[in-house]
Amino acid sequence: MSIVSLTFSGSCNFSARVGDNVYYASTPSTTGGFNTVDVSGEASIVLFGTIDNIDYQTPSAGFTIDVDKNANAANPTSGDFIFFSKDNEINITSLKGYYGSITLKNNAVNKAELFAVTCGVVESSQ
């Protein structure tokens, strides 16, 4: 595998971590004011590789993600929709313990509404 650097403007999703899977989908289109991708065929979503490094810069300067690229994956092109997922072999359980804390942040400039928040918790010991 080889390392490929992907550079983005804006700020990085704070939950992206080294080891997460990186995918891309080609030919996004605009429907109803939203960017959409037809994912009816599996070939439209490509597993590009795993995150090797994230270079967080200032939000005005953007950020760079180094991806350990899969050998058979083509490089994404400008305009492709790039997203990540957690490795489900590692992240397969709910929270465990007696105490939990969450902080929700909205860095959008427009008003946003939160309709629901849920959490599955399993007591880890008696």
Image: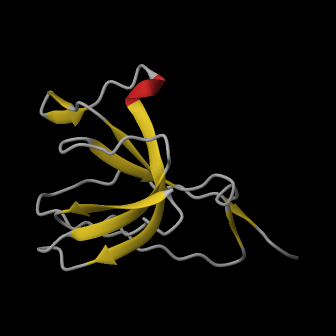
Between 19 and 30, the one lying in front of the other is 19
Q: Position of residue 65 (x, y in %)?
A: 34, 66
Q: Position of residue 72 (x, y in %)?
A: 48, 40
Does 125 sit left or right of 41 as displayed?
right
Between 87 and 46, the one lying in front of the other is 46
What residue is rendered at 72% in x and 75% in y? Answer: 97
What residue is rendered at 12% in x and 58% in y? Answer: 110
Coloring scheme of the render?
secondary structure
Q: Position of residue 66 (x, y in %)?
A: 38, 66
Hey, which quadrant is residue 38 in on the image? top left
Q: Is residue 60 above or below residue 119?
A: below
* Residue located farthest toward the right when viewing the structure as drawn: 126
Q: Is residue 66 above or below residue 79?
A: below
Locate the C terminus by quadrant.
Answer: bottom right
Q: Position of residue 91 (x, y in %)?
A: 64, 59
What residue is rendered at 25% in x and 70% in y? Answer: 63
What residue is rendered at 30% in x and 44% in y? Answer: 76
Q: Is residue 74 above or below residue 89?
A: above
